[in-house]
Amino acid sequence: MKRYSTLSAIIGGIFLVGFLLFILPANIPGSGILVFLIYIVGGFTATYLSKTNKAIFGFYEGLAGSIFGYLPVILIFRSVTSIVIILMIINPILGFLGGYIAKSLRLHLNTENNQDSNN
């Protein structure tokens, strides 16, 4: 059962990223920065919702999001630009960053809760 909760957290992060990318208009200023923030939020969500507190789940979310997001583009257009390759490398790193933030936040909240219960 432990794997299914982790898998559902990663899938939830992917759906969150997909939804936010779908509603984000491409012509607004700063939309490129928002895409990076969306992948960080997706990694945060995948790690924070999983039972085990490992930042690697954010990496998996970013990797799966990159594969499912950019693989159809590569297969349809049959040409790979360097920007697609760079984004396929950067997005898992951003997911890992979001996972690390979630891990740090959860550890910080757990230590505060333990200190409050001891007092």
Image: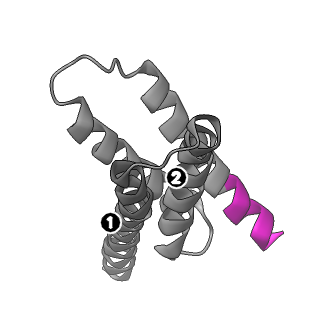
Q: Which residue is mark 1?
A: 101
Q: Quadrant of the N terminus?
A: bottom right
Side of 38 relative to 76 (left or right): left
Q: Are marks 1 and 2 in contact (CB under 8 Å)?
A: no
Element marked by disc 1: helix
| Residue in view at x 37 percent, y 76 percent | 107
x, y (%) of residue 17? 49, 40
Mark 1, other Cα within 10 Å: few <14 / some 14–19 / many ≥20: many
Q: Number of labelled discs?
A: 2
Residue 22, x across and y down, in percent: 48, 24
Residue 65 drawn above or below residue 15 = below
Please provide percent x and percent y for residue 110: 40, 74
Identify the residue under disc 2.
66
Sooner in the amino-acid sequence: mark 1 or mark 2: 2
Q: In the displayed image of the protein, which residue is found farthest to the front?
A: 79
Q: Quadrant of the C terminus?
A: bottom left
- Residue 81: which disc? none
Q: Give the residues drawn in magenta, as a range.
A: 1-8
Please rate how many residues cluster around mark 2, counting C-alpha atoms within 10 Å: few if below 14, some from 14 to 19, many from 20. Answer: many
Determine the image quadrant of residue 108.
Answer: bottom left
Q: Closer to the camera: disc 1 or disc 2?
A: 2
- The residue lying toward the viewer, choosing from 32 and 96, is 32
